């Protein structure tokens, strides 16, 4: 209940005999008094509730009440204690519920302030819920498309903090409808990052890797954020199902000149070069993964374990023409039935080529030699073309490695490189 002093002051202001023009100034003085004289949070909340009910009553017009309510919101922002600020904000919000149509701007400002307070307490769900109440489609006020998208993106990112991808995607889709009208580059970046995080959380790692990689090239971001985005792109590419599409994604990331700067470069290089991964390397890599990236799949294995098994199986298919099921199981660290199951699934999906001889318990991988031995001229010609493409690919790889070394030399020893170029230039001229 409000204090006697505040109750008496409000009665004087509500008195019909009081001069109407003097009331706004009287309410402002009383608001300052309430904020300065409150002994504890309960006194403040009771007095504030009585004050808000008074300015929303019929004794003041809407035109006079709006700036007074705006002053209340600004005063609540200055309350140092977060819990008291939240209680004061929710009290004001409840008082506005029945008259929100007349005070949409003040309601929106109050909700954004409350969202900030909830975020400080790391209560992201409540912050998202309070922002959802903002009237973005209204006949009372016209909002810019950038402002609408900013609210939706903020709600999306709050839900992502709690791994609620379903709710996050709902608001991302709303923002997507106005994306082409957005003029603020920071909002575009926020949309791209949210989209990448949703793809990541939904375990669509290949698409997430592409989204993070595109995000890492943004000139608006500082170097640290770009490096973090590149790191996320590599992590998602590593976790993606093994196959041609992932190989292309790994190649793109491996050729990025910034890749050697991130901690995940070692595992990226091994995967790109189709080298087998050891258990120690996988354990070191897993320490920096998020919880959803370590979640268990339907067969009981983790997302990371499944990705590593499929990668090692793909690498084995390039190392061997054939391999026994038991030997493959030992290589993958699985029992024989599971190893054969992984191989059968990847063969069925076309991610590796070959066949399984279940009688002899041998997995046969398609190779150049086995096709040529069959004596098919068309097969020979295709294999010859394949050999040439492999040769071209290897030459291209060597050229790219030389270019990478030259870039690193230029970065580390620019003076030495300039001197060498100046020395070699006369020899190159005609």
Image (tube, helix red, strand yellow):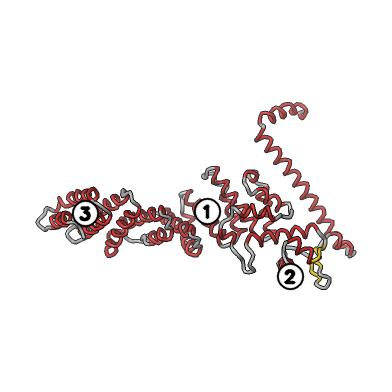
Quadrant assignment, res 150:
bottom left
Q: Position of residue 297 (x, y in %)?
A: 61, 66
Closest to the observer, 319 or 252: 319
Say whether marks 2 and 1 touch (CB < 8 Å). no
User: Which label is found at residue 122?
Assistant: none
Q: Which residue is mark 3?
A: 64
Q: Along the horizontal axis of the image, is 110 left or right of 51?
A: right
- What distance separates the C-alpha of mark 3 from that of mark 1? 43 Å
Q: Are marks 3 and 2 in contact (CB under 8 Å)?
A: no
Q: Earlier in the sequence, mark 2 or mark 1?
A: 1
Which residue bears the numbered disc 1?
193
**Element type at mark 2:** helix
Q: Quadrant of residue 200?
A: bottom right
Q: Give above or below for 41 relative to 406.
A: below
- Earlier along the polypeptide chain: callout 3 or callout 2? 3
- Tell me: 91 left or right of 308: left
Whether residue 137 is visible, yes or no, is yes
């Amino acid at each position: 209940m409000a204090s006697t002093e505040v109750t008496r002051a409000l009665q004087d202001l509500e008195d019909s005999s009081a001069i109407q023009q003097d009331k706004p100034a009287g309410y402002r003085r009383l608001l300052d008094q309430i904020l300065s004289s409150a002994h504890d949070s309960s006194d403040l909340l009771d007095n504030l509730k009585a004050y808000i009910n008074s300015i929303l009553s019929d004794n003041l017009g809407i035109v006079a009440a709006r700036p007074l309510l705006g002053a209340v919101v600004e005063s609540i922002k200055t309350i140092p204690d977060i819990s008291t600020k939240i209680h004061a904000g929710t009290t004001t919000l409840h008082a506005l519920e029945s008259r929100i149509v007349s005070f949409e701007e003040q309601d929106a400002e109050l909700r954004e302030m409350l969202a900030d307070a909830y975020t400080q307490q790391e209560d992201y769900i409540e912050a998202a819920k309070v922002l959802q109440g903002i009237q973005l489609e209204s006949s009372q006020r016209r909002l810019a498309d950038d402002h609408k998208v900013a609210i939706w993106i903020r709600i999306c990112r709050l839900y992502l903090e709690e791994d609620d991808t379903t709710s996050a995607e709902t608001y991302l889709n709303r923002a997507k409808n106005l994306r082409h009208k957005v003029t603020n580059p920071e909002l575009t970046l926020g949309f791209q990052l949210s989209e990448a995080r949703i793809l990541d959380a939904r375990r669509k790692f290949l698409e997430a890797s592409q989204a993070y990689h595109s995000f890492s090239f943004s000139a608006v971001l500082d170097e640290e954020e770009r490096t973090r985005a590149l790191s996320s792109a590599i992590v998602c590419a590593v976790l993606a199902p093994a196959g041609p599409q992932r190989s292309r994604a790994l190649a793109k990331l491996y050729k990025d000149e910034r890749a050697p700067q991130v901690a995940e470069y070692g595992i990226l290089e091994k995967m790109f070069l189709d080298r087998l991964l050891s258990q120690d390397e996988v354990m070191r890599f897993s320490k920096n993964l998020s919880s959803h990236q370590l979640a268990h799949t339907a067969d009981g294995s983790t997302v990371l374990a499944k990705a590593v098994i499929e990668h090692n199986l793909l690498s084995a298919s390039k190392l061997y023409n054939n391999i026994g099921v038991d030997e493959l199981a030992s290589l993958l660290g699985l029992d024989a039935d599971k190893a054969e199951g992984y191989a059968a699934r990847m063969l069925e999906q076309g991610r590796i080529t070959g066949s399984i001889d279940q009688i002899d318990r041998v997995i046969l991988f398609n190779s150049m030699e086995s096709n040529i031995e069959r004596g098919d001229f068309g097969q020979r010609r295709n294999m010859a073309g394949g050999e040439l493409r492999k040769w071209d690919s290897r030459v291209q790889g060597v050229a790219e490695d030389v270019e990478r070394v030259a870039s690193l030399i230029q970065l580390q020893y620019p003076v030495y490189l300039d001197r060498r170029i100046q020395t070699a230039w006369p020899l190159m001229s005609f």
